[in-house]
Image (tube, rainbow, N blue to C red):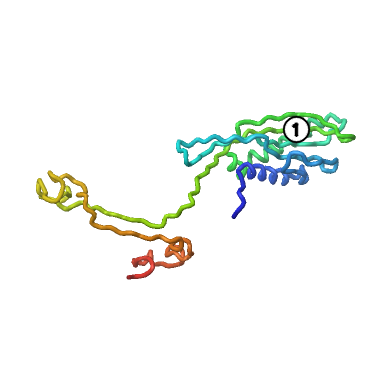
Amino acid sequence: MLPLIPIRSKIRARATELLAGLAAFEGHVFNARNPPLRRDLLPAARVYVDRDNRVNQSQSQDIGFYLGEMTLTVQVIVEAGSDPTTADRLDQFCALAEYALLTDQVWRKLVPRVDGLETDITLDSQGELRTAIGTINIACRYADCMVPVFADDLKTMRIQLDFIDPPADPNLVGHPTDPPDGYPGGYPGPDGRIEIEAEFNLSPTDWDDGATDWEDGDTDWDSGAPPGGSD
């Protein structure tokens, strides 16, 4: 069984991959909230999700088409020196992160709509290490669909065909006004009799054995012969 990968994880993973590919971060991008950071790892970025909410947009109780609203957080950390350029450097790194996400075709396919971006600027000190942090909260919208899985299989199919009786066929010329075996007055439509009836027993091997006529290289379908042979 394949592992289930939520859209939230895909959005976060793609954002991490994009930022890690920027030369400015030197690969110091973490798909986690609180990885330990040292001076030699700066500048760096953390990518995580604070909130994810999905609302069912479908009229059906069985099939769920969900509109997701998620806050993706990208936290940019640079070393805060005593020079006045710290704020500018932090702004540049934040702008690089935003531009990388919002212009990437793959990420925007996962997140077709961005409602807004909000950035909080803070200063922090851990011992001798002083850092400037830009926390970018990105309001994302995405779509998700979850369809119920039914355990039972279709095993038998019965087909009954009621053809239009010729006396009741309005396309025939000169049919009687009151046919004895059709609808009174010659109204069009079936007469309630089953002319053809058939029952088919279906087996999973009929469709999942890898040898179906349409995918095993059999060209009967385009040669005028019935699939599987000419009989």
Residue at image location 75% in from the left, 45% down from the top = 23
Which image quadrant for residue 140?
top right
Which image quadrant for residue 70?
top right
Question: Would you place residue 95 above or below residue 4 in this image?
Answer: above
According to the picture, the residue beneath numbered tag 1 turns out to be 134
On-image quarter of the C terminus: bottom left
On-image quarter of the N terminus: bottom right
Q: Residue 78 location in percent, x, y?
A: 80, 36
Residue 129 vs residue 74: left or right?
A: right
- Tell me how many marks there are: 1
Residue 186 vs residue 138: left or right?
A: left
Mark 1: few, some, or many residues within 10 Å (few <14, many ≥20)?
A: many
Q: Residue 96 location in percent, x, y?
A: 71, 38
Label 1 secondary element? strand
Question: Would you place residue 147 above or below residue 91 in this image?
Answer: below
* Amino acid type of the residue that numbered disc 1 sits on in the rendered structure: Gly
Question: Would you place residue 180 above or below residue 59 in this image?
Answer: below
Residue at image location 33% in from the left, 56% down from the top = 158
Which image quadrant for residue 53?
top right
Residue 147 vs residue 69: left or right?
A: left
**Residue 228 appears in view:** yes
Residue at image location 82% in from the left, 41% down from the top = 37
Q: Residue 103 location in percent, x, y?
A: 63, 40
**Residue 113 appears in view:** no
